[in-house]
Image (cartoon, rainbow, N blue to C red):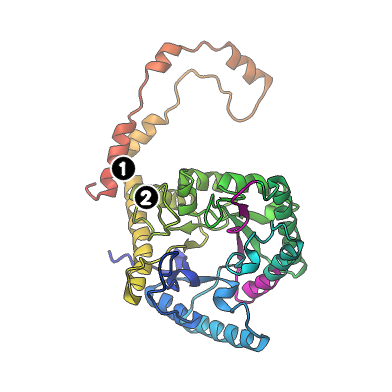
Amino acid sequence: MDYAPRPQDKFTFGLWTVGNVGRDPFGEPVRKPKTPVELVHLLAECGAWGVNFHDNDLVPIDATSAERTQIVRDFKNALSTTGLVVPMATTNLFTDPAFRDGAFTSNDAAVRAYAVQKTMRAIDLGVECGAEVYVFWGGREGTESDATKNPAESIKRFREAINFLASYSKSQGYKLRFALEPKPNEPRGDIFLATVGHALAFITTLDDPDMVGVNPEVAHETMAGLNFLHGVAQAWEMNKLFHIDLNDQVIGRYDQDFRFGSSNIKGAFHLVKFLEDVGYNGSKHFDAHAFRTDNDEGVKAFAKGCMRTYLILKEKAARWNADKNIQALVQQVNSIAPGLPAWQGGFSPDKAKLLSNHSFDRAAIGSKGQPYEQLDQLTMEVIMGVR
């Protein structure tokens, strides 16, 4: 099997991913920048389905109206030529010095107003290029010292901005869905809406919670020491998994944005298996970067590797589901003990009475083991290719 990506896989990359020039806090760029048109053609060559962007990935922040028109025209022509689509867009509210203390949560009211204006214009640009999901990553929305911001007031400011922008989008007749992207830290010491759980709770307080979901990222939840799959599963169960960022990360490190599956292959397997089992049909966005040690050919290898790994793990997930020994263990650990009162499916007084009066053999329950070691070992054997 060649594991070649197909359009139905819905693999996407951001302009900022394959366009990363290899700059870091301690080193200058190692690769020459490419234009958005060049990056679209690069992704098409690698077999991607779509490309996403921040507003200023496409149109420089100081571009004139005429320059914007030409840049967008060239970009859309490249999309038409290659067949790539733009499923998602977002706003850069973290690079410019104006956002040194945040955007929607800045203590400066002028900054907050400018951030909302910039996002309105970026929403227009995203929709113009075909985006259906709009992501909000609050990279500067945080603190280094809690003496500097009232966190409750900051959440109110964040809510006010999202509510305003949601209303703006609807007033324009856009069919956008918003997705919040959590991250615990970096570039701020502590970032508001740090995890999927924080974001899901925040969404319930919005004026239109149905319009807003989450865009969880492997690296961000892993940086917090959390199980990424669990956050994704909760978002899915709540109908809030609007988008997903795939990459890899080592716990306790800076935001590494490694090639998908390159660090925690077991976690990547369970994630792919979950997405495929539940029928997730949204974009599979690789928000990652090639190693700084690589040249342009390495960037192509990186992009192809992200997609190839996903497809390999998808095949292994299907093998896991078809393995008779594994499925026998799954059935065993999920078996229903006979004679239990039927309390599931909602409360009723009769169910409560039956459950209250039922006699459980606590010693027997406590002595029962589960073959989880066997199940985990067989899973590892599937991943390692010996089953």
Give the residues in magenta: 120-146
Q: Which residue is mark 1?
A: 379
Viewer-nearest residue: 285 or 288: 288
Residue 86 lies, with reference to residue 153, above or below; the image says: below
Residue 367 lies, with reference to residue 179, above or below; the image says: above
Distance from disc 2 to disc 1, alpha carbons, whole Å, reads: 9 Å
Residue 302 lies within the magenta run? no
Viewer-nearest residue: 291 or 202: 291
Question: Which image quarter holds the N terminus?
Answer: bottom left
Task: Determine the residue positioned at 67% across, 85% down.
Answer: 65
Q: Position of residue 288 (x, y in %)?
A: 43, 63
Q: Position of residue 224 (x, y in %)?
A: 49, 46
Task: Determine the residue positioned at 56% across, 55% down.
Answer: 188
Residue 214 lies, with reference to residue 226, above or below; the image says: below
The amino acid beneath tag 2 is Phe
Q: Position of residue 357 (x, y in %)?
A: 58, 11
- Disc 1: CA contacts within 10 A as few (<14), some (14-19) or many (>=20): many
Q: Position of residue 356 (x, y in %)?
A: 60, 14
The answer to whether one can see residue 15 in this image is yes
Task: Determine the residue positioned at 49% across, 58% down.
Answer: 245
**Tag 1 or tag 2, which sits nearer the N-term?**
2
Kind of element beneath mark 2: helix
Residue 130 lies within the magenta run? yes
Decide if residue 284 is on the left or right side of residue 308.
right
The amino acid beneath tag 1 is Thr
Viewer-nearest residue: 31 or 357: 31
Decide if residue 325 is on the left or right side of residue 83.
left
* Label 2 with label 1: CB-CB less than 8 Å: yes
State the mark number for residue 269.
Answer: 2
Q: Quadrant of residue 297?
A: bottom left
The answer to whether one can see residue 325 in this image is no
